[in-house]
Image (cartoon, rainbow, N blue to C red):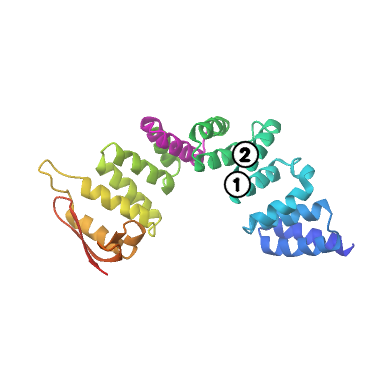
Amino acid sequence: MSMFDFYINEAESCFNAGDYHKSLSFALEALGIDRVNTTANLLVGVSYHCTGNHSKAVAHLEKCLAEVRSRENIWGLYAKSLFLIQADEQGGKEYEKALKKYPNSVQLLHEYGFFLCKAGRFKKAINRLEKALALDEGRDDLMQILGTCYFNLKKYEKAESLLESALELNPENHFAAHVLGHIYFNIGNHEKAIGCYSRVLFYDASNTKALYDRLLSRVCFKDSEGNIHNPEAAQKDANQLLPHIDDFIKLTSKEGKPLTIVEIKINTTGGIEFRVTQ
């Protein structure tokens, strides 16, 4: 066996075992022997992708595009890398080309729909994601992204149905729970919103955005006399949020100098008071 073949075999073995850094190391050794070899460039490209270096992934995959476009999963990986380096237009074109060849690829429809949603192109994302969901009905991740698209289009009833279904399939899908909380908050059902944000925090205790959202829901959840239902819980959330409050609220003095929030006080009617220092 030649050294080139040895390095290729080791790279493939490591890649299949999920050790992408070792795969990259062996693939680069092979590429050092034959810099124009399609297999070596392909392995280097996919290994760079899996180790998070998407610019280099694109550079190597573009050296063997004919091979990339002959494999559904690698074509999707190439398009995904393009989006991850903000080459959205080119990435979109690659997904569109790939879907002409593989129109029923759930992977391609899912990934493209995700990036379209992330880019705010919700109607186009819905088109791709609904097709993916029709092909693979038991996917809570597809329901979650679809629900997010409908939420952003303010189609709350459709979004709620999808997100509830996602949570029935996977109660740990805290991304779905977070968006569902936003729906309930927006329609004024603060009690249900609190429940959703609490679910997020149960599975992701460090999620300060969910903590902030739950605090807002608590101060909006009031009784007929205008008092919040659980001021103690609201104050507890405020105290827990305090070290991270600058991520959400920034105060300045009359002179425009930044102020540091050192205490958050919640009153019984839902008012929020800040004690600050310069």
Can residue 206 be seen in the rendering of this structure?
yes
Q: Is residue 181 left or right of residue 90?
A: left
What residue is pinned by disc 1?
83
What residue is pinned by disc 2?
92
Place of residue 115 in the rendered image (x, y in percent of width and height, measured from the top left) = 55, 42
Place of residue 51 in the rendered image (x, y in percent of width and height, measured from the top left) = 64, 59
Task: Tell me the quarter of the image containing the N terminus.
Answer: bottom right
Q: Is residue 21 left or right of residue 166?
A: right
| Foreground of the two, 59 or 24 | 59
Tell me what residue is drawn at x 62 percent, y 46 percent.
87
Q: Please give the label number shown on residue 94.
A: none
User: Would you say residue 155 sits in the magenta stretch?
Assistant: yes
Place of residue 239 in the rendered image (x, y in percent of width and height, measured from the top left) = 25, 63
Mark positioned earlier in the residue sequence (2 or 1): 1
Between the C-alphas of marks 2 and 1, the distance is: 8 Å
The region drawn magenta spans 137-160
Dot 2 lies on which element?
helix
Place of residue 127 in the rendered image (x, y in percent of width and height, measured from the top left) = 54, 30
